[in-house]
Amino acid sequence: MRETTPITVARGDGIGPEITDAVLHVMEAAGARLKVEEVPAGEQVYRRGHLGGLDAAGWGSIRRTRVFLKGPITTPQGYGNKSLNVTARTTLGLFANVRPCVSHHPYVRTRHPRMDVVIIRENEEDLYAGIEHRQTDDVIQSVKLISRPGSERIVRYAFDYARANHRRKVTAFVKDNVMKMTDGLFLKIFNEIAAEYPEIKADHLIVDIGAARLADQPERFDVIVTLNLYGDIVSDIAAQITGSVGLAGSANIGDACAMFEAIHGSAPMIAGQGIANPSGLLMAAVMMLVHIGQGDVAARIHNAWLKTVEDGVHTVDIFNRGVSRQRVGTHAFADAVVERLGQMPVTLPTVGYAVTARPAYESGVRLSPRRKAVKELVGVDVFLHWPGGNPDELAGLVLPVATPALRLSSISNRSQKVWPEGNIGVFCTDHWRCRFLAPEGVAVGHPDIVELLSGLARAGLDFTQTENLCNFDGKSGFSAT
């Protein structure tokens, strides 16, 4: 008997238990060699005071099996509760989100019959780090963090994925025309790594026009790699234009663990009615089986699913009179897939997968050697909570506090320069940035910043945040405005 693979399963909330039952039924009938450890997750665990939606035993199971098949989770409203998806990705180091988005024309209605795109999204950084602060009465900030290792890891994963799956092109979606440093770093790394894969075409688009073109002409794309927030939005667009978000599975890959899930939510409004489509979670299970080296079973299930869709056996969400032949519920759909195990689709392309186990992540350790840059402190941005509205008046309060080592260079409000010679008529809030720079040839250190802040405090000015301004290898490490 071939060895079984342990996996952790959470049925989740809403329609989660129903679709999980259906998926486990199909995998068992197909001969999947699994040892299932079920753990509670979601609302019942949140209610017991576990803010991440899993208890210690659940986390322990995932770290032991290293494979997590998760039903959809409902995150309760209320301060302190954290999305289990976001928590799992960061806690387990699941840095890569992989979403294949494929059309199944003419059996699932779509305007894009030739669509076959894979979205690879960075999972741990960007605005999804959730670092937010209320700084004043009027202003809340969210911090966007992009790192060189995080960017290199996801970009290299995208090219490795393309090479392993015989994909011809990788496209980066960025907004480097506005976020020149963060998105600019991601694009710079993309171009560096693309040069190592000469057989794969590489290009990039600004994310707004990229998303528009994806929605209009998805056949132009093959693999898309992008940052966390853009990837979340773009992958849902891509899944929807295939015909249904409910058909798409998702993999979250890390060094030590991998999590597989449908991309749709828990849909509590239809829970318990037996009408939910289990296809998204089933396609996630197919990805899981490939990941653990049971590609033979994965192909058996996937081809049977394609044959089921091709035969017009459809759940209500994709039922289309004139194309569909039989409307079925959750478990009847699973039974229809089981009946077709061993059969192949006739019109839709068949699939095949390698029967070799994949480590959670094969190339993450191949990060480029990093050289420590020469770092020089040249100034500081001080953010003030000041309810006045006249920048000249604020400058009059701040200028006497400036020191010989740190002189007031400019004042801005919501990124708009308002002093000196600021834009007339700029709407100002109570959140001000005062930029202090060292004069040419003057060395500045942390004690100078402390002296400056002490002076601001004595003047009764409420500083909420500081950001050191540094040059790296003689080049500015901060935005000009």
Image (cartoon, grey):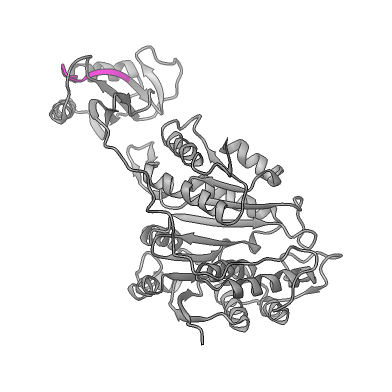
Q: Is residue 296 left or right of residue 470?
A: right
Q: Is residue 426 left or right of residue 27?
A: left
**Residue 360 occupies which quadrant of the picture?**
bottom left
In the rendered image of this protein, does residue 417 appear above or below residue 375? above
**Residue 21 occupies which quadrant of the picture?**
bottom right
Residue 309: % across, % down: 75, 69
Residue 245 appears in the rendering = yes
Residue 77: % across, % down: 45, 60
Does the segment drawn in magenta span residue 246?
A: no
Residue 126 appears in the rendering = no
Name the residue rendered at 53%, 51% in the picture: 120
179 or 269: nearer the eye? 179
The magenta segment: 402-410
The quarter of the image holding the C terminus is top left
Q: Is residue 206 left or right of residue 351?
A: left
Q: Residue furthest bottom?
A: 1
Residue 355: % across, % down: 56, 71
Q: Residue furthest top?
A: 421
Name the residue rendered at 42%, 49% in the picture: 153
In the rendered image of this protein, does residue 114 appear above or below residue 429? below
Q: Residue furthest right?
A: 322
In the rendered image of this protein, does residue 399 appear above or below residue 167? above
**Residue 471 occupies which quadrant of the picture?**
top left
